Amino acid sequence: MGNQTILKEFLLAGLSDLPLLQLPFFLFFLLIYLLTLIWNFLIIVVIVTDSHLHVPMYFFLGNLAGLDLSYSSLTVPRMLFDLHTKTKTISIQACITQVFFFFYFAGCDIFLLAVMSYDRYTAICQPLHYTQVMSWKVCVQLMPIVWCLSFTNSLVHTLNAFKLTFCGSDIIESFFCDLPLLFRISCSDTFINVLLIFLLGSLVSAGTITLTFLPYVYIIKTVLNIKSKGNRRKVFSTCTSHLTVVFMYYGSVMLNYFGSSAHHDFAGDKVVAVFYTVILPLLNPLIYSLRNQDFKTAFQRVFRKKSLVK
């Protein structure tokens, strides 16, 4: 290390270095990003505007839409800027700051999905106590807990990342900064960092997976005891959107951190990263809104009122 230059900035490799693909990629991801902004913003507007949706389930859905907006805006604008200007350098401080917010928003998503599972469990398995258990006071108190847990987890990882030294390759094989990618190009001993990711990741994953999926054991038991097939289907339909998002999110994150990254498959890593940073924030609101009759009715009601006012 004594004869090597300490790096001050990195070079983001991006999605592809082929000139012919730069413009198509730029237009495609610009469209995806605009749709993500519009659809998530519409979900927040409809939930805030329509009084019929002022219930815990949609309160949490509105928070999820806000997180998706932030999550997508953390990586996609930078990617679009690099595609347009071909300026792909980023300072180490900016890179690790991006890592902090990336872990923070991702953690908030995971903890919020667990809270939404508990909300569905209470609504289906304890309907008579639902308004007491999931009161507005409880809902408002749960969100700071989600933020604090995610903030603590993110802070631990990024503080240790600032201790790393970079003196070899300056190329990050992605379109944004992520911890496993920084570990690959660091010339420091990353054992503690990797151990922290494994231990904290295992702890957070075990806790959130338990809190997310255990309620569905009781939900399925309750639904199976409903004699009417129509009512059974109607009750469980409120959970299918949430389960779909949970499986997609957990699957992509675990594949990124515990799967393809171990084999240095940069192309595969980029595909997975594009899915959970660009595509998933667009799919989440679509899955929740298009499969939810109450939300579609509220959407029509809100914009019918806007048209009448005009």
Image (cartoon, grey):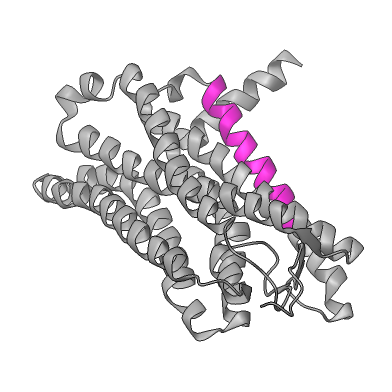
Q: Is residue 4 above or below residue 177?
A: below
Which of these two is toward me, 234 or 125? 125
Q: Is residue 44 above or below residue 237?
A: above
Q: Nearer the viewer, residue 50 or 55?
A: 55
Kindly indicate the quadrant of the structure image that contains residue 123.
top left
Compared to residue 26, the image places residue 140 above or below, namely: above
Where does the C terminus fall, quadrant-wise? top right
Is residue 129 left or right of 79 when viewed as pictured? Answer: left
Is residue 92 rendered to the left or right of residue 261? right
Residue 49 percent location from the top left of the image: 56, 20
Side of 211 relative to 51 (left or right): left
- Where is residue 38 drawn, in percent x and y? 69, 41
Q: Is residue 291 visible?
A: no
Q: Report the residue at 68% width, 55% height from top.
A: 75
In the image, what residue occupies the spot 89% across and 62% down? 84
Rendering coords of residue 158 (x, y %)? 54, 52
Left or right of 303: which side holds 29?
A: right
14 in magenta: no
Q: Nearer the viewer, residue 290 or 187?
A: 187
Using the image, determine if residue 287 lies above or below residue 252: above
Q: Where, by quadrant of the figure, is residue 129 drawn?
A: top left
Q: Considering the whole magenta stretch, tell me its main secondary structure.
A: helix
Q: Which residues are magenta?
A: 31-49
Q: Residue shown at 40%/49% (left/top)?
A: 110
Q: Is residue 48 magenta?
A: yes
Tell me residue 282's x, y (percent): 60, 52
Asked if residue 279 can be seen in this view, the reply is: yes
